[in-house]
Image (cartoon, helix red, strand yellow):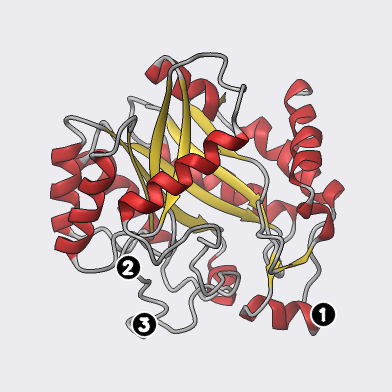
Amino acid sequence: MILLSDFYKNLFGCKVYKVSLCASCSCPNRDGTKGSGGCIFCSQEGSGDFIAKSKSISEQFINGKSLVEKKAKGRSGSNRVLYLPYFQSFSSTYGDFEILKSEFLEALSMDGVAGLAIATRPDCLGERFIDFFSEISEKYFLQIELGLQTSNEKTGNVINRCYTDMDYENAIALLQNRLPSAHIVTHLIFGLPNENIEDMIDSVRFVCKVNNRKSDKKFFGIKITNLYVLKDTALEKLFLEKHFECLTQDEYFYALQKALKLLPENAVLHRFTGDPPKKIALAPEWALNKRKVLNEAKKLFIKQ
């Protein structure tokens, strides 16, 4: 296993910061194509609550870069820093192809950009997008992030995911075959309703297995976060009606420690904590102190 900061530093020779952006897109389980309401944990902003969506991509990037620079002042250890535009909100390949293509290219044109990171669903990788990504991956670093959340199909139905594990497996195979230089990242959530520790660990095993089916065993990414409850979501209703309880910090760290032991050498750990927007976060309270959680979580790496 390698930490993301080390992965980027080895690749680019300097510190790389992601800048979150919102493209002109939605999700097929929001607009009625596959479902409505979106995933039950997702806010109305499509997991992009920190982004000023009314602005152009260039304006979003400039604003986001400025915020990152303030937070990261003095941390890089070098004068050279690069930025990775991160299309985070909703499913960033679900929308008008020409509009999204122009937004991706606009992001690539900004100063100090290392490439692109694009978050989407396994069932939203159309042929035109794959062809376009194939072209840009010849010149730029490309990171494709897929939301899986869990490999438990029953849980997938509970959270209104509206795609299957097979959709995910097919997407990984497609990306590995058509975009061999792309860095593929998978999102998992620990603490989803009705899941126990073994369910969470099974999801980690599944991701590692699917991403290592090819013999070359290139680096793949994994992002693990704890479930948190946001106001005005379907998850909030389940939580308030006591259909489930959020993991305690100790429970989450226990599951995370077990997961870390399973990650192979070619796994890049992108995230190991959640980052809920405090204004709309309801639970768990321990997740709201990000600095404290990060410091505690980092201790787990010493024990590996």
Q: Position of residue 188 (x, y in %)?
A: 57, 52
Q: Which mark is nearer the camera, 2 or 3?
A: 2
Give the residue type at disc 3: Asp
Give the residue type at disc 2: Cys
Q: Residue at x 60, y 70 (%)?
A: 41
Q: Is residue 79 left or right of residue 93?
A: right
Q: Position of residue 58 (x, y in %)?
A: 31, 49
Residue wearing tag 3 = 31
Residue wearing tag 1 = 242
The residue lying toward the viewer, choosing from 236 and 198, is 236
Badge 3 density bin: few <14, some 14–19, many ≥20, Cα 10 Å: few
Nearest to N terminus: mark 2 or mark 3? 2
Q: Residue at x 74, y 37 (%)?
A: 294
Q: CA distance from mark 3 to mark 1?
A: 29 Å
Q: Is residue 28 left or right of residue 63?
A: left
The residue lying toward the viewer, choosing from 18 and 233, is 18
Residue wearing tag 2 = 25
